[in-house]
Image (tube, helix red, strand yellow):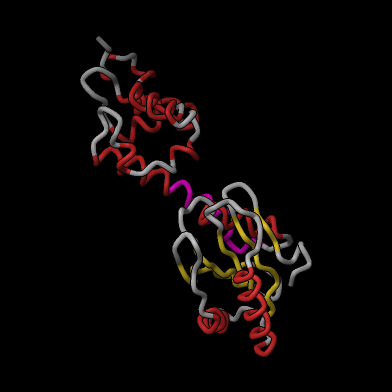
Amino acid sequence: MYTPINQWAEDDRPREKFLLKGKTTLSDSELLAILIGSGSRNESAVQLCQRILASANNNLNQLGKLSVQQLMQFKGVGEAKAISIAAALELGKRRQSEATSELKKITSSKAVFEIMQPIIGELPHEEFWVLYLNNSNKVIYKTQISKGGITGTVVDSRLIFKTAFEHFATNIILVHNHPSGKLQASEADCQITKKIKEAGKHLDIIVLDHVIVTEKNYFSFADEGML
């Protein structure tokens, strides 16, 4: 029989430990335990969270890929607890994305990858995004242009340039993901890049790069001399 959290020494209880010693002293399982509030009849919230984390190799990035339905497979995790975990991990991902992209100056394709990987790197479907830059090559806006199935997405170049004018962008970077993990530009990728680049020339908006993002790596048209 396990000992309930409310019978633990005060500095061992996650909430109390958070207040007494600070958030950085808590383990990942203790932070998750605060989120879900309670465990089950046979294990504490911390023990339950240790079990959930162990299934993801104690990796928060892997845990963030689990759906609400997958989280609910753990005994003691209902819909409300599963949603709490998924929502917290999504907030963490968004915080990382905002921290890296806020008026960041683009100096390389790697900088584009660092901004976009948390947003589209792990998606099961393709999305096409555009980064809008000022004349100092700082990101002033980014947006999803289209969303498609696993085989591709349709891109409206008129919408791309309309948004560029609205935000007074002088340069743009095209970005999309390959859910397959394949780091190779397709014929369609090359055609849409050429089409948008040519349109931009007439409007004095330069296409600086087209970056294909996967979960762990990226492909840059500019780096490969394909622009």
96 inside magenta stretch:
yes
Relative depth, front residue between 196 and 135: 196
Write the residue at 50% across / 50% down.
122
Q: Quadrant of the C terminus?
A: bottom right
Most foreground residue, 183 or 135: 183
Please provide the residue range marked out in magenta: 91-104
- Quarter where residue 15 is shown: top left
Residue 44 versus residue 191 in the image, above or below: above
Left or right: where 57 falls relative to 100: left
Magenta stretch mostly in which secondary structure? helix
- Relative to 89, residue 156 above or below: below
Instruction: Return the x and y of residue 7 as percentages of the image width and height.
Output: 26, 14
Residue 5 found in image quarter:
top left
Looking at this view, is 84 or 59 the one in front? 59
Up the image or down, 121 lies above or below 129; here it is above
**Which residue is located at x 36 percent, y 27 percent?**
49
The tally of labels here is 0
Q: Position of residue 203 (x, y in %)?
A: 65, 88
Residue drawn 71% across the image and 65% down it: 221
Quadrant of the image for the N terminus?
Answer: top left
* Nearer to us in this view, 154 or 7: 154
Does residue 23 belong to the magenta stretch?
no
Q: Residue 133: horizontal and vertical position, in percent?
A: 64, 72
Residue 44 coordinates in the image, percent (x, y): 29, 21
Q: Is residue 41 left or right of residue 136?
A: left
Q: Residue furthest left?
A: 41
Residue furthest toward the bottom? 202
Residue at (50, 81) in percent of width and height: 159
* Residue lying furthest top: 1
